[in-house]
Image (cartoon, rainbow, N blue to C red):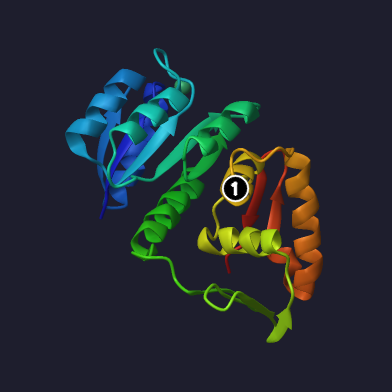
Amino acid sequence: MARILVVEDEQDLASLVEYNLRSDGHQVDVAQSGASGVSKFKATRPDLVLLDLMLPDISGTEVARLIRGADGKRTPIIMVTARGEEADRVKGLEMGADDYVVKPFSVKELLLRVKNVLRRQEDAPAKPAAVLKAPGIVLDTDRHEVRVDDKPVVLTHMEFKLLRTFLERPGRVQTRETLLSDVWGIEADITTRTVDTHIKRLREKLGAQGDCIETIRGVGYKLVTP
Ligand code: CA
């Protein structure tokens, strides 16, 4: 299975998570501070990192930044946050975390997230596909065409880019800020409200399939995967 680094300072929780990941067949390393998390990352090169945001020395977002800086293969990170750390969660997702769980979480939920993130990593194509699909939706990047339930749908340039971004990142939460920088370009002089307006219009144009773009309250959006 996979090699997983757990960065968590609460010893009981770290042991529980470690035990369950091992039972699932994974190889697990535990770090109880941010600094040791970064050095263990460099030493073990794990396939996945479970990263607590509230650490005794440096913050989880800083650990994520340091890991990203030392990481050629873009190892997936699942952030572990306490309820009410919404600003941190958004920051963490911007930092490139792939998913997050909120404490207190069930072990079953955590194992499922781990499984999903690892599977996404395996499925990730080496180069971007020309035709992207979701149930009822086909987007052809070469022809610049979108079909919904087999009928052509005309999208504006930005709506097309927005839909393409979602289709390329199925099941991954996209913050408004990420969408702004990836779809509109970081220098665009517009606010996050623009994202909401475009999402609304895109949903309308997708008609019966519009629900595939789910709102994650206070964070952003994601493409629902079947
Ligand atoms: Ca903690």
Residue name at image x 28 percent, y 33 percent = 70
The residue nearer to you, when weighing 187 against 147, is 187
Element assignment for label 1: strand
Image location (x, y in percent) of residue 157: 68, 63
Is 83 on the left or on the right of 59, as rendered?
right
Residue name at image x 47 percent, y 27 percent = 61
Is 118 on the left or on the right of 180, as rendered?
left
Q: Which residue is mark 1?
A: 174
Image location (x, y in percent) of residue 109: 51, 48
Q: Residue furthest left?
A: 43
| Amino acid at pointer 1 | Gln
Image location (x, y in percent) of residue 146: 65, 76
Q: Quadrant of the C terminus?
A: bottom right
Label tally: 1
Residue 88 falls in image quadrant? top right
Q: Is residue 98 visible?
A: yes
